[in-house]
Amino acid sequence: MVARVLLTLATRRHVGKVLAVGIVCFLAITSFAWAAGETKRSETSDKKDKYSAHDYTVMVRPTAWLVFVEGKYETSGPRDQSLSLKIDGDLGYKDPYPTFSGEARFRWGRHDFSIIGMYFDQSENAPINASFTIGGKDFDIGGVADTEATVTDINFRYGYSFFEFEEDGFRLGPTIAVSYTDLSLELTELTIAGIPTGTQASFDDTLPIPTIGVSAEVPYGNFLFSTQFGAFYFDSGNFEGLGIRAVVGAIWRPYDHVGIFAGLKAIYVDLELKNEVIDDLTFWGPAVGLEFRF
């Protein structure tokens, strides 16, 4: 299950920063939204048309996400001694990893229907001197261990806004979603004391993960500021997890049908396993992309 750490959509200090930035941005955006709404009610129809220019029927947004993977995996060894491994240290995941994601959205009045996809495929190897048991297999690594994780996540989301750009100058409302996440994880002993081995522990499963959240959008000139939060829970039978998805960003729209997106994305989760604990794991990092809307 060490490899599972690499997937589980990372450490308290960064999660705190991500959540703090997200919450501040969310409060600022929603406060600005209410203020904008009050202002909008007294504006002319020409001004309303300017706000409605940020609306669309179909939107497509391919995005490059620079992902940092962090967190801590705690388990016990063969004599019940405690063992703690840092994903970004002990397992070698120290560098950011380019990951690609995309979103397609259909907007009908106050209703949004979205499909959001993400693909992550990385492997690392690092020297480890530890003994532990995973899935009934004993690992006594005094050399190099290889870990690999592949994650394919497809999120189907519905959102409703209590407000509209044309009438209120902003959008704000709840979201519900379910994601189908395919996990493929593997740990391999490459060497023990310099001697090659082939001992492996692997996991491959597809999990439906429900999510509820909130979304807000506020335009300002050619910019559209947005934030999305979602909380999720899942139970695979082998482990259960509770976490959040968060996106905070801005879109610059110099043309009617083309925009540039920049922001911060994060997936945070706490996991509870039968004999193991995964503390505050997060995939997080900056994201940039293009937006096409019609």
Image (cartoon, helix red, strand yellow):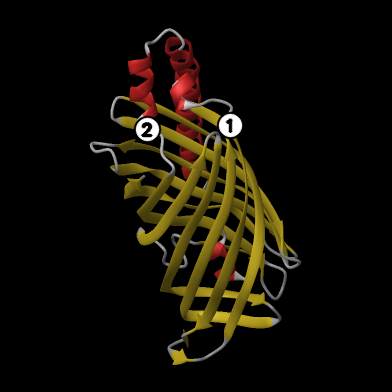
Question: Which residue position is annotated with label 2?
Answer: 54
In this orientation, does residue 215 appear?
A: yes
Where does the image place residue 251, in percent across and percent down from the top left? 33, 38
Residue 278, how many percent across, how many down?
62, 58
Type of the residue with mark 1: Gly
Residue at (50, 26) in percent of width and height: 164
**Residue 147 or residue 102, whichever sits in front:** 102
Q: Position of residue 110 (x, y in %)?
A: 55, 34
Would you name the residue on which mark 1 appears? 173
Image quadrant in which the C terminus is located: top left
| Residue in front for this viewpoint, 75 or 217 | 217
Q: Is mark 1 in CB contact (under 8 Å) with mark 2?
A: no
Q: Residue at x 43, y 14 (%)?
A: 40
The amino acid pointed to by label 2 is: His
Query: Can I make out residue 82 in this image?
Result: no
Whole-number angstrom distance, CA of label 1 to CA of label 2: 17 Å
- The residue tagged with tag 2: helix, strand or loop? loop
Image quadrant assignment for residue 66: bottom left
Give the vertical position of 7 relative to 53 (above or below). Answer: below
